[in-house]
Amino acid sequence: MPPPSLTAARDPSAATARRRSKEEQGAAAKVHPASEKGAMGAAVGGGEGTWRRPEWCSLAGAAGVLRRHPLPALFACGLLLFMAVEYTIPMVSQAAPPLDLGFAATQGMHDAVAARPWLNSLLAALNTVFVAMQAGYILWAILAEQRPRAAVAALMMFTCRGVLGCATQLPLPEEFLGSGMDFPVGNVSFFLFFSGHVAGAVIAAADMRREGRLALARLYDALNALQVVRLLACRGHYTIDLAVGVGAGVLFDTLAGWYFDAKSGDGKNAPEKHCRSCQCHKALLSH
């Protein structure tokens, strides 16, 4: 009987298998050194394929970025523009009043209101009614609908406003038109930075949008815009006070949402869903 090795040598299928195995080993030997070289090149920072130019660095890539993301591109242009403006704009002297473009834009309305004290009192009274509307809605949301997010956002906002108002007390504008009908009623002192009138309206409108009350939210936004014009015309706030008031309303409404997400222990569900079942409301009053 011939030995097994001789039998395997005479078997055509075995010879084919051996030949195929040798070919695969040879192919692997050819591929493996290249991969090792590439890995070593990547490790030491050299070699082919370690760094490739981003697609947006090309002309076509930049055009694609502008087409897909116009808003960030616009802000990038704004950064370059205001860097040039900031480093070249003349500084306001210490003896001069603050330069406020909002005051300049509403100078005509300011002159008209200053010449008619009754109109100043009427606008102040209407503005106070709008502030009462904001407070009434926020109280309704927590007491009647048991949704405390807007109320907590307002508490956060007014506390922060008080801290900042004490930290930096801005001078009252020279052309300020006070009224006993304005909120707070009675010509009392108030913080200029930032506007609680504007921030409260933003918080209330944001809550309305969450509840699907879009028409009411648009009404509050429109009244808030009119309030901004009136405050500028009467010199009740600087422009920066009003702009930061908008941002503060958005910020503290978001922070209140994060707070209730954390209290509920479920970051995936919206906090208002928990508030509808009174869980947030009960947790707020029981701790």
Image (cartoon, helix red, strand yellow):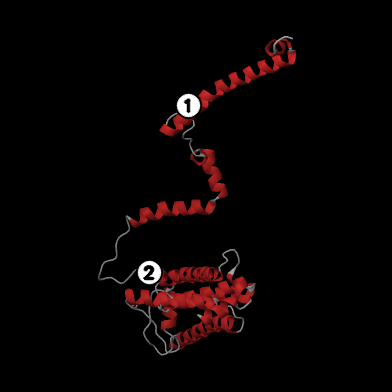
Tell me residue 157's x, y (percent): 45, 75
Task: Name the residue type under label 2.
Answer: Asp
Q: Is residue 252 visible?
A: yes
Tell me residue 43's x, y (percent): 43, 33
Q: Which residue is mark 2?
A: 100
Q: Quadrant of residue 278?
A: bottom right
The answer to which of 134 and 240 lies nearer the viewer is 134
Q: Residue at x 44, y 82 (%)?
A: 113
Up-down relation of residue 36 to residue 55 (above or below)? above
> Around disc 1, counting alpha carbons within 10 Å, would you say few (fewer than 14), some (14 to 19), or many (20 or more)?
few
Task: Name the residue type under label 1.
Answer: Lys
In the picture, the disc for residue 37 is: 1
For residue 227, side relative to residue 211 (left or right): left
Q: Secondary structure at mark 1?
A: helix
Tell me residue 187's x, y (percent): 39, 88
Which quarter of the image is occupied by the N terminus?
Answer: top right
Q: Is residue 227 visible?
A: no
First in residue order: circle 1 vs circle 2: 1
For residue 145, side relative to residue 84 (left or right): right
Q: CA distance from mark 1 to mark 2?
A: 64 Å
Tell me residue 283's x, y (percent): 54, 78
Residue occupying the far left of the picture: 95
Q: Residue at x 53, y 70 (%)?
A: 257
